[in-house]
Image: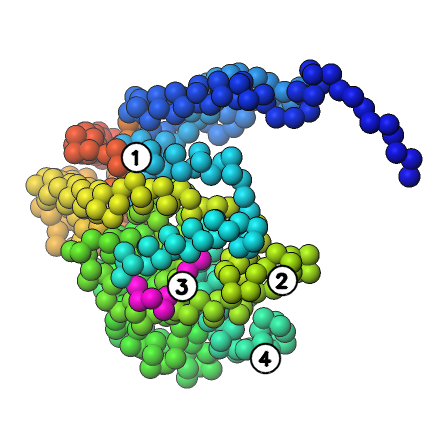
């Protein structure tokens, strides 16, 4: 091979080859710091959701990739011009959809510190501090939510990924050598997984990914408070055994997606022990509330679980994404997923955690840093105070609903979640599914009105809510969780709901 003589670049050319010069970068960072602080300070004044039609944002951005670079100032002004108005602002104080998760100043600072480090936390050797900090924050959360020390964890992006890994371990333990030979090669039976009808669809996604089959996730009925009926679980398992299926795992949810209901984990754990099932607890939303002494009853039965997922990005103030899967004896997870390619052999250090061994991901972000910054900034006390405030606001909102005969609660208030339904001028019915018929008419037309209320409010840009179905009826749902949401914001949302409900009722009954 002929080696060309070394080329000498001018200062200008050298600059174009490397990174932004330090002084310019410093100036950009200062501008960005102001931009972030202004954004947080003025977020109230933004529309919560855009009024764009699909495609409107792309229509304003050149489709061709840039040939020449743009200055940062221009890019940032395009963020202001094109991106910010095209967002649903999840950190807006009047965004009350889903679980109302939050952005916080320490969370933003944590993300900023993480960016220049840009490490790959795949092994201890490639990232000693990232690995050790991950182990540390996982254990802090474990202590806060009162999980016994035999639970070890790993940080993934989401709870969906967590449940998939948990069920992979359950599958391997029930049919050893699936990892090596696959389901058919290992002669695996048809496995069944049980979750309540209110459980999250990530159970089915996991079954799809693991080759277990979506239909083999059996949904168990719930009681009047939307909690799994443990007697029905037992019946379904017994039926499956009779029909030749192999019960593999049960998923108990602590904080279901629609109503934040809590399954009877202790009773489910007993059934799991009796039938030798893996018990996974989906605490994606609810488990974080166990840091409150007054919510410790939530943890009943957790010590009997095989795995539990906690999403600090839902209820413990960490920005998306940050989800922890805990497994009782984490070595069970490692056995299923460890696989060290030759080129990484030198990077693995025995007796140290190499987090690549605990899941399918090799490259891993340094997520623990932002969690560490937040947990240190707030302390357990600060997080508990904020969670308590969300619970207080949820209950206050529920009181407003109880005091307006045109509305009724559609489920018990749980943690930061309130589900309710507009029922018109009728007297409140004892149950949401037998909603009284008022001026607004039949249950179907009430469904339309409830859906219409949410759509009108979301389209207004003033607030953002979600709707869900409970027992076949459409209900409105709010989730408190944003540190910026005050009682005043909530009152404004309530007034908006009342006003829009009247308009909606008029339009839909005319
Ligand atoms: C109870 C519950 N479990 C799991 C999930 C999935 O969470 P993730 O987005 O982290 O996968 C959700 C999502 O909202 C949820 O509500």
Residue 340's label in the rendered image is 2
Which label sits in the foreground, 1 or 3? 3
Residue 152's label in the rendered image is 3
Q: To which residue does mark 4 refer?
A: 187
Q: For the C terminus, give its image quadrant.
A: top left
User: Measured from the top left, where is residue 2 in percent x and y?
Assistant: 91, 35
Q: Disc 3 vs disc 4: Cβ atoms closer than 8 Å?
A: no
User: Measured from the top left, where is residue 235 in percent x and y?
Assistant: 32, 77
What span is in magenta?
147-154
- Earlier in the chain: of badge 1 and badge 4, it is 1
Neighbours of disc 4 within 10 Å: few (<14), some (14-19), many (20+): few
Q: To which residue does mark 1 refer?
A: 95
Q: Quadrant of residue 220?
A: bottom left
Q: CA distance from mark 3 to mark 4?
A: 31 Å
Q: Quadrant of residue 387?
A: top left
User: Measured from the top left, where is residue 332 in percent x and y?
Assistant: 47, 70
Which label sits in the foreground, 2 or 1? 2
Q: CA distance from mark 4 to mark 2?
A: 26 Å
């Amino acid at each position: 091979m002929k080696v060309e003589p070394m080329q000498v670049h001018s200062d200008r050319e050298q600059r174009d080859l490397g990174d932004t010069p330090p002084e310019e970068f410093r100036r950009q960072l200062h501008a960005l710091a102001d931009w972030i602080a202004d954004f947080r300070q003025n977020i109230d004044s933004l529309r919560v959701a855009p009024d764009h039609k699909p495609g409107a944002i792309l229509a304003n951005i050149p489709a061709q990739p840039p040939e020449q670079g743009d200055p940062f100032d221009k890019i940032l002004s395009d963020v202001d011009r094109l991106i910010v108005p095209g967002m649903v602002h999840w950190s807006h104080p009047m965004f009350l959809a889903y679980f109302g998760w939050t952005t916080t100043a320490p969370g933003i600072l944590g993300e900023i510190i993480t960016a220049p480090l840009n490490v790959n936390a795949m092994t201890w050797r490639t990232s000693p501090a990232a690995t050790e900090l991950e182990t540390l924050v996982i254990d802090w959360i474990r202590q806060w939510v009162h999980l016994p020390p035999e639970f070890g964890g790993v940080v993934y992006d989401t709870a969906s990924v967590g449940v998939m890994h948990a069920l992979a371990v359950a599958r391997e333990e029930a049919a050893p050598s699936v990892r090596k030979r696959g389901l058919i090669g290992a002669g695996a039976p048809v496995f069944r997984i049980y979750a309540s009808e209110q459980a999250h669809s990530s159970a089915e996604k996991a079954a799809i990914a693991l080759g277990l089959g979506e239909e083999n996730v059996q949904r168990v009925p719930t009681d009047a408070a939307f909690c799994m009926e443990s007697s029905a679980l037992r019946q379904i398992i017994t039926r499956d055994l009779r029909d030749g299926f192999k019960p593999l795992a049960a998923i108990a949810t602590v904080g279901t997606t629609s109503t934040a209901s809590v399954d009877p984990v202790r009773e489910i754990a007993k059934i799991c022990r009796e039938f030798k099932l893996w018990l996974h607890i989906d605490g994606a939303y609810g488990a974080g509330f166990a840091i409150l002494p007054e919510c410790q009853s939530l943890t009943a039965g957790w010590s009997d679980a095989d795995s539990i997922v906690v999403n600090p990005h839902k209820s413990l103030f960490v920005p998306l994404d940050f989800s922890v899967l805990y497994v009782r004896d984490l070595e069970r997870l490692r056995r299923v997923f460890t696989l060290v390619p030759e080129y990484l052999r030198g990077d693995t250090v025995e007796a140290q955690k190499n987090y690549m061994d605990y899941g399918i991901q090799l490259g891993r972000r340094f997520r623990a840093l932002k969690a560490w910054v937040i947990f240190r900034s707030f302390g357990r006390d600060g997080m508990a105070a904020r969670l308590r405030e969300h619970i207080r606001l949820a209950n206050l909102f529920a009181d407003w609903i109880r005091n307006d005969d045109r509305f009724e609660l559609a489920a018990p208030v749980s943690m930061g979640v309130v589900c309710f339904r507009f029922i018109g001028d009728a007297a409140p019915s004892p149950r949401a599914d037998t909603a009284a018929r008022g001026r607004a008419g039949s249950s179907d037309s009430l469904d339309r009105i409830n859906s219409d209320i949410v759509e009108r409010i979301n389209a207004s840009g003033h607030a953002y809510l979600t709707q869900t179905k409970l027992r076949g009826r459409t209900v409105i749902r709010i989730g408190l969780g944003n540190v910026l949401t005050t009682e005043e914001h909530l009152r404004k949302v309530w007034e908006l709901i009342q006003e829009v409900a009247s308009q909606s009722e008029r339009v839909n009954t005319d």
